[in-house]
Image (cartoon, rainbow, N blue to C red):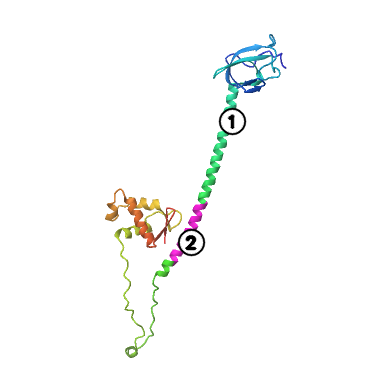
Amino acid sequence: MAEDEQQPQFKVKELVEVAARTHPGFNFQGGTARISKVRDERVEDGGPMKDGSESRTTGYTYDVKYVIGGSERRVDAQHITSKVLATRQELGEQRQEEAQRKKIERERAEAEARRLEAERAERKRMARAELAKRREAKAAKKPAQKRRKVLPVVDEKTAVDAEPTTTQDDTPPEPARAESDEIRWLRDILIDRVPRTDAPDELALEDVVATVLAASDAPPALAEAVGCKRDVVTSLLSQLDAANFIMFVDATIFLV
């Protein structure tokens, strides 16, 4: 016991933090308080401690008055911490907790971003596989071009007497499906005007809509669709998708 201490650790009216203590017959809640009196136990020994201390650690004890109400007498110095010091410690702990919380949130966000990117890449891979199938099916539907038959060189008499070696196909060609002006115009927009980002055959839906909205040569049906032009564009894109000219995946348009 350092009863030869010359100066008390705390001063009257100083804001302090008193620790909570449990002692047989007593339950000290502690809390924020102000020093109301400094007792020099070297001059006047108050006897056994009643604040849970087995003995005094210094030659002084302190009476405190709690901010939320109540008071306590003869509190030993070991249970008192300067509020300034306590506040610094609390601020340090708060900063560490905040830094740790931000780190956890950042790591969680990065993990979520990696997961979403992996899922997007997988969807894109599957879309590419589907796109290849649709392109093969589209190519298979195109009529094969007939090779021109090269006739042998003959003289005039032989040509007159020779029987025809080729037959003319009188089957009329299948009439082309009529396209609306809006569909034809939008198809040209997709091919020539919409900016590309990842690949020449990939278009972002937002880029398509922005290009259409900014165009000054839109057909009348689109030009007059003020306020709902985006819906009209989406409807036209759906028609192109059904016609196997484009394919939608995750707000991305693939040219088939």
Is 89 situated left or right of 216 in this image? right
Q: Position of residue 125 (x, y in %)?
A: 50, 58
Frontmost residue, 11 versus 69? 69
Q: Which residues are magenta?
A: 118-136
Asked whether 124 falls inside the magenta stretch, the response is: yes
Q: Position of residue 167 (x, y in %)?
A: 34, 82
Residue furthest toward the top? 43
Q: Is residue 10 above or below residue 105?
A: above
Q: CA distance from mark 2 to mark 1?
A: 54 Å
Tell me the amino acid under the disc marked 1: Glu
- The answer to whether marks 2 and 1 mark residues whose Cβ atoms lie closer than 8 Å is no
Q: Is residue 251 above or below residue 56?
A: below
Which residue shows up at 64% across the image and 23% down it?
A: 21
Asked whether 85 falls inside the magenta stretch, the response is: no
Q: Position of residue 8 (x, y in %)?
A: 65, 14
Image quarter hosting the N terminus: top right
Image quarter hosting the C terminus: bottom left
Q: Position of residue 186 (x, y in %)?
A: 34, 57
- The residue that mark 2 highlights is 129
Classified by dominant secondary structure, the portion drawn in magenta counts as: helix
Which residue shows up at 63% across the image and 21% down it?
A: 27
- Say the numbered circle drawn on residue 234: none
Tell me the amino acid under the disc marked 2: Ala
- The residue that mark 1 highlights is 93
**Helix, strand or loop at mark 1:** helix
**Helix, strand or loop at mark 2:** helix
Q: Say whether residue 118 is visible.
A: yes
Is 11 situated left or right of 4 in this image? left
